[in-house]
Image (cartoon, grey):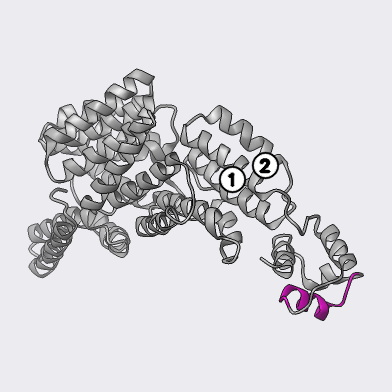
Amino acid sequence: MNLGEKIRYFRRVKNLSQQELATGICSVPYLSKIENGVTEPSEEIQQHLAERLNIRLHTKNEKSIMQNYVDLFYSLYMRDYPTAKQKYDHLIDIPSQSVEEDILNKIFKSMYIMMTTQETSGVPEMLDEVAYIDDVIKGEKAFYYLLARSQLSFFMEEFEDSHSYALKAEKLLEEHRFHEWERGYLLYMIGLTANQLFKSIIALEYTQKALTIFEKTYFFKRCADCRIILAIVQTRIKNFEESIKQLLLAETIANSFGDEVIKGIVYHNLGSIANHKGETEKAIELFARSLQAKEGEPFIAKIMTIYALIKSYEKTNQPEKGLELLSTWMDQLKDNPIFRGYELHFLYYKDLFTHGELNEETVQFMIKDMIPYFRKRNEWIFLAEYYPILGKYFEDHQKYKQASMYYSSAMTAMRKMYDLGVTYI
């Protein structure tokens, strides 16, 4: 990045116009030439511009600065959040005086927020601020930027984008020297996002590679994460025996370290297997244990289990328990676009629990709100679940044309699921 580009970057970051920066230092046309790399300003003008922007125009010891941020990431990777907080507080308190520092600050601050809170408040804005500086986002910085983007997209449930960013980051692994644990984490992210996209072969391949690295470095909690992904893929293809084996291995690790978070995830997935095997009461017990284990976790870590428990209450005709659960959690879904899909599910089940059966008002809600939302996002699993419900409703009301339309749509959704390798709803 040349001198002019650095000046333009910080002028934009500090929300200054060219006129505001140039006043008393140089003319606006001259500043424009500097920013565009047409002319090189004198040392005196450089100093005045740097003072007004409160920056250094020449980076000092970028390698040392980068290492400080990588150390922060390592603490996050190890889930040593107290140490991560100490490092984070120290780094964030130091004002960024160069473009390189400012970029690293925003990238790693974004990762810190997401990995410690599982939330994304302020993250899109920070990453967008550095996104356009293609000639600076290179090498190691590009790797971490793409990783942060992958994490953000994952939390936003934009799994195609998350997977794409992670694959772009993978290309940089061979071009630059990274630690083995960084390689393992990226491979895990590729496996994780592939799993969300039902790309089972890719998920198995990358997760197994990550597991091998984590086992070599004796990081057993990350091994448990990998075994959970492997179990989910095995559940998808109805290999329940292998899935349970992987989950029990993950539970052993969780018990060894007293890790309630991993236990919660294990119980959730064991509950899913019980559901697929028709053991709904057992599933309810396991989902309840999962919620209990996740008690201290953010809402985003609980939402899938809450949804699974609500569905199980509907299946076993326990509307009172379903409504009680909904009343506890509904307010946390409102006005948050990340949870919009779950909000739609919850509203549907609230109506179902309240009225005891599908009515015209709920049907219209499904047609106008639910179906368009899931169709836009190509969420075939949910469409394959809700289309037949609408088909049956219209068939029971002797509206055979509409019934036929929704049954046909259900078949299309199930074919899409089959193409993805999903064999269950």
Quarter of the picture holding the N terminus: bottom right
Q: Is residue 42 located in the magenta-colored stretch of the structure?
A: no
Q: Which stretch is magenta?
A: 25-37
Q: Which residue is mark 2?
A: 92
- Residue 142 image offset from top left, x and y in percent: 52, 57
Residue under the image location 61 percent in, 50 percent down: 104
Q: Main secondary structure of the magenta part?
A: helix
Element type at marker 1?
A: helix
**Nearer to me, 386 or 250:** 250
Q: Is residue 54 visible?
A: yes
Binning the other alpha carbons within 10 Å of mark 2 as few (below 14), some (14 to 19) or many (20 upward) gives few
- Residue 297 image offset from top left, x and y in percent: 43, 31
Judged left or right of residue 353, residue 54 is: right
- The answer to whether 174 is drawn above or below residue 307 in the figure is below
* Residues under numbered marks 2 and 1 in contact, where contact means CB atoms less than 8 Å apart: yes
Rounded to the nearest angstrom, the CA distance separating label 2 from label 1 is: 8 Å
Q: Which of the marked residues, 2 or 1, is nearer the chain's N terminus?
A: 2
Element type at marker 2?
A: helix
Judged left or right of residue 15, residue 383 is: left
Residue under the image location 85 percent in, 71 percent down: 22
Q: Which residue type carries mark 1?
A: Lys
Q: Which residue type carries mark 2?
A: Ile
Name the quadrant containing residue 307: top left
Q: Which residue is mark 1?
A: 109
Name the quadrant containing residue 264: top left
- Residue 343 image offset from top left, x and y in percent: 36, 48
